[in-house]
Image (cartoon, rainbow, N blue to C red):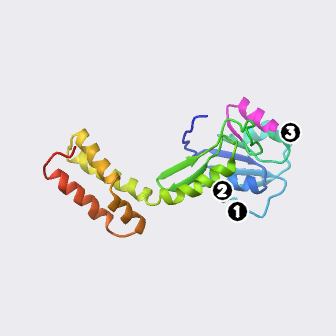
Amino acid sequence: MIPLLHDFSGHTVLVVGGGAVGARKARRFAREADVIVVSPDFSDRDFGGATRIRAALQPAEIDDWLERTAPALVVAATDDEAINDALESAARARGCLVNRADQSGGRDPGSVVVPATVRDDPVVVAVATGGTAPSLSAYLREELEETISGAGEMATCLAEVRAQLDAEDVEPARRQALLRMITQSPELWTALRNGTPKPCQVIDDVLDENLSGGDST
């Protein structure tokens, strides 16, 4: 599998299964997509504001549900393998993405593996093992949480600096060198992670020193 980022804004994700796994999947996608969860029963979990429909979905009814909801992604998260198989088959036939939440240990997870993710918006880091070792993905996610601390604000700062350098017609090679110096600045990372007002000053110092003259490369 090749990792990609997919924009689900304005799209529907259909989750079939109201247990703990279905709730976790619903929370994951509800931050961006319109999520519909179909199940005869729902666990006492947070579904992230997803629309919940109480229904005991049967294989013969799946095409009708897909027709009505027009999902971009179908998540098969029931404890009934026959229903999950039917969901996967029908979703693939319609060209929908499909995730088998009941498949692990090397078995086919469908066309989509939902990775463990760490966010410091707009930065997103994802870890996946192809469905073979979810516990490893979870462990690596925890390890990465501290590593990317401050990365979101760093990305925002770099976007602002890039716009400034573009407006000042700084030539591309020099612009990239300046952005690289800012990105690799230990002082800036420390300021970002400590939540101090120093980040802007660090960036200004780098720009003042390198734009006032001299070779930045």
| N-terminal-most mark, 3 or 1 | 1
Mark 1 residue type: Asp
Mark 3 residue type: Ala
Look at the numbered disc 3 and give the secondary structure of its residue.
Answer: helix
Circles 3 and 1: CB atoms closer than 8 Å = no
The x, y position of residue 112, in whole percent, is: 66, 39
Residue drawn at point x = 33 percent, y = 62 percent: 187
In the image, taking residue 175 as reference, residue 74 lies left or right, namely right
Asked if residue 37 lies in the magenta stretch, the reply is: no
Q: Which mark is residue 82?
A: 3
The x, y position of residue 9, in whole percent, is: 56, 47
Local crowd at mark 3 within 10 Å, few (<14), some, or many (≥20)?
Answer: few
The x, y position of residue 136, in whole percent, is: 65, 50
The x, y position of residue 103, in whole percent, is: 76, 42
Q: Mark 1 points at which residue?
A: 46
| N-terminal-most mark, 3 or 2 | 2
Q: Calculate the distance from the C-alpha at mark 3 to the C-alpha at mark 2.
A: 25 Å
Q: In this view, does 198 lie above or below 54?
A: below
Mark 2 residue type: Arg
Q: Mark 2 points at which residue?
A: 27
Give the position of the C terminus as an image quadrant: top left
